[in-house]
Image (spheres, helix red, strand yellow):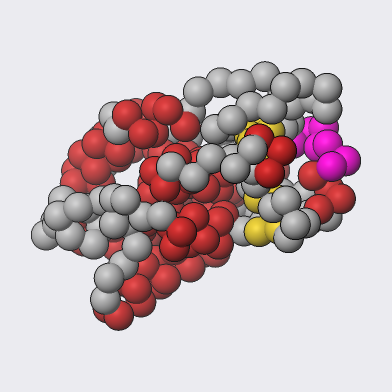
Amino acid sequence: MSKNQLPILYSFRRCPYAIRARLAIKTSTIEVELREVMLSNKPEQMLACSPKGTVPVLLFPDGSVIDESRDIMEWVLKQQDPESWLPNNKNDAEETKRLIDFNDNEFKQHLDRYKYSDRFPEQSAEYYREQCEGFLQQLENKLNTNKYLLGSKISMLDMAIFPFIRQFAHVDKNWFDQTQYKKLQQWLEQMLALPLFKKVMDKYAQWTEDQDPLIF
């Protein structure tokens, strides 16, 4: 496939949704043109194909668009899944859906309020953090019996959730490191040490229309 026929990925380096999409794309070995954007200065080309204005956005040469991160993950992995991240049985598929749904809805809502508590003065940062802890305990319980969230190997579930746990941990790293979530801490450190994660976190300049395509 020539460069001008590659899908285009609009991404923002630090966004956890974009991180998990990049993780799946990179492990699938499917090439895309990466366009790093600033969320404070979203390019018109991105807004034209996805008016909601969030990343990631995957734009195909035929004009079709996937603009939900978990859908991007599923699409690329269904094309090529060399590390077998996709669940291979009904129970794992249901658990993957359940935990990603919880992460993307309840947990993310509380995480945003914890991270930006000054914008939500109705409650304290500690209150919002406590609301997050139910999910942390769910993950801790799973990791008490398995190295990863679905068993002995990394799956899509780990990769979909860990960018958000990374974000949570770094709101107050000292607090997180002193909690009882020891298995979760170990799991997070393992995920952060992955060469794949380091690859997808390379820094790129903000995309401009006149720059050469950046193949990711």
Q: Residue at x 71, y 58 (%)?
A: 65
Figure quadrant of residue 211: top right
Position of 99 with respect to 121 (left or right) is: left
Q: Nearer the viewer, residue 192 or 77?
A: 77
Residue at left offset 61%, top offset 21%: 204
Above or below, comparing residue 104 to residue 204 in the picture: below
> Residue at (71%, 38%) from the top-left corner?
4
Quarter residue 188 falls in: top left
- Res 169 seen here: yes
Q: Is residue 44 magenta?
A: yes
Is 64 positioned to the left or the right of 56 in the image? right
Q: Nearer the viewer, residue 27 or 55?
A: 27
Q: Residue at x 16, y 51 (%)?
A: 147
Vertical placement of residue 136 versus 118, above or below: below
The x, y position of residue 130, in whole percent, is: 42, 53
Q: Of 106 and 89, which appears nearest the observer?
A: 89
Instruction: Give residue 114's position: percent from left, percent from top.
Output: 54, 45
| Picture quarter with the N terminus | top right
What's the magenta region?
A: 39-45
Q: Please state the total of marks drawn on the protein image.
A: 0
Question: Relative to the observer, which residue lies in front, 54 or 117?
Answer: 54
